[in-house]
Image: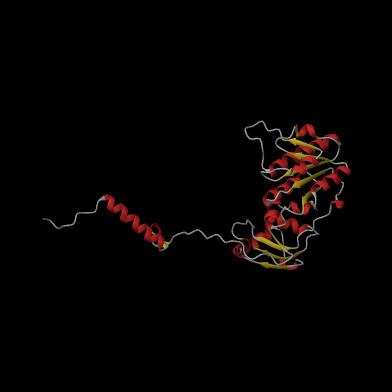
Amino acid sequence: MNDTKKPGTPKDSHYAKLRRTFRDQKNGRDQKSGGAPAFRPKRPLPPGENAPDGLVRLYGLHTVRAALDNPRRKISRMLVTRNAAERLEIADIGALPFATELVEPKDIDKITGTDAVHQGVLIEAEPLKAKALSALGDSPLILVLDQVTDPHNVGAIIRSAVAFGAGALITTQRHSPHESGVLAKSASGALEHIDMIEVRNLADALGVLHEAGFQTIGLDSEGPAELEKAFAGDKVALVLGAEGKGLRQKTRETVTALARLDMPGAIHSLNVSNAAAVSLYAARRFLAGNG
């Protein structure tokens, strides 16, 4: 009987190679690079502590630039990278009227978390004060949100509202998102360019708008009329409800008209922020042709 060991089979060699590769990766080594440390993705960081009482944290180049240009915005502190300062065209951070610190991106990551796209700049500032309905200006186009709670959607809606020249955004004091970094980043600077009005009772507020000459149109995928055919008069307030549940029953009963966006495709509803953009475009065209 021959005790000489047989050479390993191809299968045995394959598994031995897999074991060696696993050991190398576990030890942070890369065989192909001759023992150099293997690449390991950074672990995501959660957001740090909340902003100091009475302040909000806003981040992103467009958001911060708009805040810097807004005389109503009271900023207490800024963290900014050298690259972001150049992109914001800040020649001398020491000349700013608030505390400013030059930092590395990772320093802001520790505050916002790595999921936030801060683009190298963060400010701490007082939130803008919401206005009362009595402060509504003379804009012929406004937007009303019936308990839309997602800050990403509200931010995107604010951006569209400013783009199409809406004079104000009306929300309820409850069941509406407060000003935050997420909302402001989604608005991409538009938060600084529109009057935010808060009301206690939306149905009462719609009644005040009616007295002021506004036609209030509630967007509903099952509305009896197409939006373009529902417009009348020279002042329009578009009313949109939350994702999923839509307009509340009391709101549906109070608006001047319920209307739908005509969508001939297989899908008959849009995300609320997309519906807002389409509706604002249609309303702006109507008002322009009616002026």
The type of colouring in the image is secondary structure
Is 7 left, or right, of 252 in this rendering?
left
> If the image is split into quadrants, where does the N terminus sit?
bottom left
Can residue 60 be seen from the camera position used here? no
Q: Which of the 4 image quarters holds residue 284?
A: top right
Picture mark count: 0
Out of 173 and 250, give the one closest to the viewer. Answer: 250
> If the image is split into quadrants, where does the C terminus sit?
top right
Out of 130 and 222, give the one closest to the viewer. Answer: 222
Q: Residue at x 25, y 51 (%)?
A: 9
In this rendering, is residue 49 above or below 240? below
In this rendering, is residue 211 above or below 74? above
Out of 231 and 125, give the one closest to the viewer. Answer: 231
Q: Position of residue 222 (x, y in %)?
A: 71, 35
Q: Position of residue 185 (x, y in %)?
A: 68, 54
Q: Residue at x 77, y 43 (%)?
A: 251
Is 148 left, or right, of 35 in this rendering?
right
Can residue 16 be seen from the camera position used here? yes
Q: Residue at x 77, y 51 (%)?
A: 172
Q: Position of residue 65 (x, y in %)?
A: 73, 57
Q: Which of the 4 image quarters holds residue 179?
A: bottom right
Q: Which of the 4 image quarters holds residue 66?
A: bottom right
Out of 256 and 281, give the one closest to the viewer. Answer: 256
Q: Position of residue 73 (x, y in %)?
A: 78, 60
In this rendering, is residue 94 above or below 249? below
